[in-house]
Amino acid sequence: MVRGPKRERTAERMLEIEDLNVWFGSGRDRVDAVKGATFSVAQGQSFGLVGESGSGKSTILRAITGLAPDWSGRISVAGAALNKRRARRFFKTVQMVFQDPYASLHPRHSVDQVLGETLYLHGFRDIDACVSKLLDDVGLGQKFRFRYPHQLSGGQRQRVAIARALAPEPDLLLLDEPTSALDVSVQAEILNLLSDLRAARLLTYVMVSHDLSVVGHMCDRLAVMNGGQIVEIMEVAALRAMKASHPYSQHLLAASV
């Protein structure tokens, strides 16, 4: 059965990151990808992580989901501190949309299988009705239900990936460059879809992007990263006004003009 509108959470902060360090390897081969990151995201807010490639922004998302297992510090979601393993209920609260819609879908699974299996794993009943609603919610409709990834455009594949992330009815979506692999003509459509879904479902977003115009359109606040560290946290109004405090942030803004 399709569930009704979700109740608004009473927790003021959906995500809290405190003194987060993430590393890969050990000994002489150790690489410190994130160093002492601290920020929080309120329920219903959209928060951006920006910086050049290799600055650590995607690594933060992977640490939250458990895909980067070597970390220290504190990560709290909806008031619950995370440990090294993610319980199944975690994935009913947090879902991630990856950068590449071509790699994120199984090539031999139809859209119906992709969504139906996700719903089944999360304990939903009346899966047929749930799949239909998800496809409608992401603007695809029923004609795409039994198609395979190779029969879809990049934008359509990303809509399926978004539908899959929405299937467990999460509160927090982690968006890792969700439009960077798409044609420019399609990017705006996906960003507008994400904006509409956030409003309709009371979602909280953490969005990684190297494109400051995307962050300016989608986010309320943002953190600027350089060399694994957060050098500045600012309101999106300051971004739009080209006002930054840290020299690196000023460099990024100047380079985006």
Image (cartoon, rainbow, N blue to C red):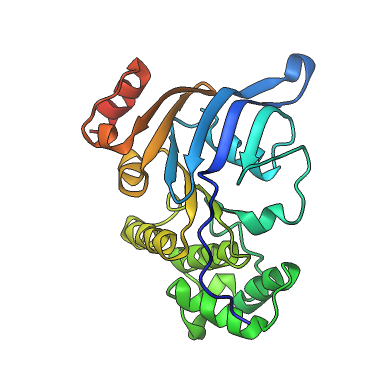
Q: Seen from this angle, which residue lies furthest front?
A: 10
Residue occupying image coordinates x 78% and y 21%: 26
Pick whichever, 253 or 129, lies toward us. Answer: 129
The x and y percentages for residue 220 are: 36, 43
The x and y percentages for residue 255 are: 28, 28
The x and y percentages for residue 65 are: 66, 45
Pick whichever, 118 or 87, lies toward us. Answer: 87
Residue occupying image coordinates x 69% and y 75%: 124
Residue occupying image coordinates x 46% and y 26%: 225
Pick whichever, 91 or 183, lies toward us. Answer: 91
Q: Tag count in the figure?
A: 0
The x and y percentages for residue 75 are: 64, 35
Taking the image as shown, residue 112 lies to the left or right of residue 84, namely left
Where residue 241 sits, quadrant-wise, is top left
Taking the image as shown, residue 239 lies to the left or right of residue 134, namely left
Pick whichever, 141 or 184, lies toward us. Answer: 141
Taking the image as shown, residue 54 lies to the left or right of residue 232, namely right
